[in-house]
Image: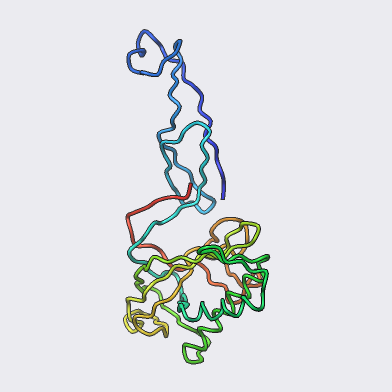
């Protein structure tokens, strides 16, 4: 992630030809102090536009999709984490890791190993509740998911966000996709909509393999929002 600060420079104008066009003139210098819009591009090529920024105002290049109605699965298999399994793993971690902090929709850990222990424990819970299948609640490419509005962030005490889960309902039966998973129709659970397994402060590229960083059960990003309603982190 990159952070930016607006620093505007007043423009000198020609009073004879342009003086009547600008209502914020003082001795031939425009006092207009608002940046109408600017396009920024992050390290992965994602673009966003921010606007109406005052002098000295800060912004960054993180793109946020706000309240999509649906998500689609892409690239490869993804996994759902039912609420009951997340809650069960959370109950266990409250006992095993007293340093863990819950703050609103954030679960905060002192280091990435402890965060991953919770993530992996959640996957093991799903493997059991799914009937003992090591695949847990898997979904094939082309599965449509209905957004249910709840988010959980897994973060480090340093402030680094490593994972964001979003609550969804499975819409597409796995029998209707080319290579289906084993998640039952209508399953409700969390999916990963943001991941930073390499801990560099930005969304991992889709070809990053979490196992390369020691996170065997870590999920890469495999969903995209189906929405035209975009907003951004500021």
Which residue occupies 63% across, 60% down? 199
Q: Note whether 11 is above or below 206 in the view shown.
A: above
Which residue occupies 57% across, 73% down? 218
Q: What is the residue that sits farthest to the top in this orientation?
A: 16
Q: Position of residue 145 (x, y in %)?
A: 36, 71
Q: Which image quarter: residue 53?
A: top left
Relative to 16, 157 lies left or right: right
Q: Position of residue 65 (x, y in %)?
A: 41, 56
Relative to 99, 24 lies left or right: left
- Viewer-side residue, 211 vs 88: 88
Q: Note whether 13 is above or below 72 in the view shown.
A: above
Relative to 151, 148 lies left or right: left
Q: Position of residue 92 (x, y in %)?
A: 60, 80
Q: Note whether 82 is above or below 74 in the view shown.
A: below
Q: Position of residue 219 (x, y in %)?
A: 53, 72
Instruction: State the scheme by which the image is colored.
Output: rainbow
Number of marks:
0
Q: Note whether 9 is above or below 222 in the view shown.
A: above
Q: Which image quarter: residue 210?
A: bottom right
- Viewer-side residue, 183 vs 93: 93
């Amino acid at each position: 992630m990159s952070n930016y600060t607006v620093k505007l420079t007043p423009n000198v104008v020609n009073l004879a030809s342009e003086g009547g066009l600008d209502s914020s003139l003082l001795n031939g210098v425009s006092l207009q102090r608002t940046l109408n819009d600017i396009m920024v591009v992050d390290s992965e090529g994602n673009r966003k536009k921010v606007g109406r920024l005052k002098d000295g105002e800060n912004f960054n290049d993180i793109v946020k999709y706000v309240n999509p109605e649906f998500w689609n699965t892409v690239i490869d298999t993804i996994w759902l984490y039912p609420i009951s399994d997340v809650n069960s793993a959370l109950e266990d971690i409250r006992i095993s890791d007293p340093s863990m902090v819950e703050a609103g929709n954030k679960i905060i850990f002192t280091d990435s190993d402890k965060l991953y222990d919770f993530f992996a424990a959640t996957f093991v819970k799903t493997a059991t509740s799914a009937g003992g299948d090591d695949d847990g609640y898997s979904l094939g490419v082309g599965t449509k998911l209905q957004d249910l509005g709840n988010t959980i962030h897994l973060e480090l005490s340093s402030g680094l966000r490593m994972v964001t889960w979003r609550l969804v309902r499975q819409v597409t039966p796995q029998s209707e996709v080319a290579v289906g998973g084993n998640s039952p129709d209508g399953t409700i659970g969390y999916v990963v909509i943001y991941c930073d397994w390499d801990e560099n402060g930005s969304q991992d590229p889709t070809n990053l393999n979490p196992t390369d960083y020691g996170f065997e059960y870590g999920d890469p990003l495999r969903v995209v929002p189906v929405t035209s309603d975009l907003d951004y982190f500021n």
